[in-house]
Image (cartoon, rainbow, N blue to C red):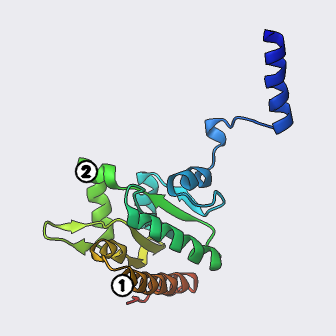
Amino acid sequence: MKKVVLLVVISIFFITGCSVKRTEDVTDGEIFASEYAVNKDNVFKYATIEEVLSLFKDGTGVILFGNSDQDECYSVVKMFMDLVSENNISEVYYYDPTMIRDDGSKEYDELLNLLGDNLTITDDDLELMIPSVYFVRDGEIVGYNDEAVLMLDIADEVELDDFLKVLEDKYFKLIKKYVDGESEDVD
């Protein structure tokens, strides 16, 4: 009887083509898809804090700071994903700074210093808002937007839809300026 059960299980694996991926074979896109419930063929690449700091020192790229525990990050990710793919941006770095922020690490302080005037001033201090998107060229921030956190204050659905349309337009303008090589501020 055991042989029959084993033969059935093996047959099922062959018929269905089931396979198990090794951890090192799982892509950033697949991990990001499971975290944000988006398509696995996305442009997001997980960055380390070292890569993030390097980007702001002398790199070029787009980075999204987010945290999948926050609802507003889901809205931004889905909106931003569509916009970058429409504008042929093939890679967006993703980093969740909450752990280094909550630990008060030196890397978080260094990140804040590199972001400089491109931070939000809160009652307590300068803060990296989540979600936020930064566009960097040769270590210079050419644009950013951290207004998505304002979604938390909007209870009315119509008002929220209007806000999201305005936010999407701002993202679109930032993306266009980045792609076109411009570095002017976008309202």
Splitting the image into 4 quarters, where does residue 84 fall? Answer: bottom right
Residue nearest the viewer, comparing 109 with 87: 87
Rendered-image quadrant of the C terminus: bottom left
- Give the amino acid at mark 2: Asp
| Residue 42 image point, x, y percent | 62, 62
Label drawn at residue 102: 2
Alpha carbon of mark 1 to alpha carbon of mark 2: how far? Answer: 32 Å
In the depicted structure, whether residue 25 falls above or below residue 32:
above
| Residue 89 image point, x, y percent | 61, 73
Q: Can residue 60 be seen in this view?
A: no
Q: Which of marks 1 and 2 is nearer the N terminus?
A: 2
The tally of labels here is 2
Question: In this figure, which residue is indicated by the disc labeled 1?
Answer: 159
| Residue 48 image point, x, y percent | 45, 51
| Residue 113 image point, x, y percent | 27, 65
Q: What SS does tag 2 mark? A: helix
> Is residue 140 shown left or right of residue 39?
left
> Is residue 119 shown left or right of residue 78?
left
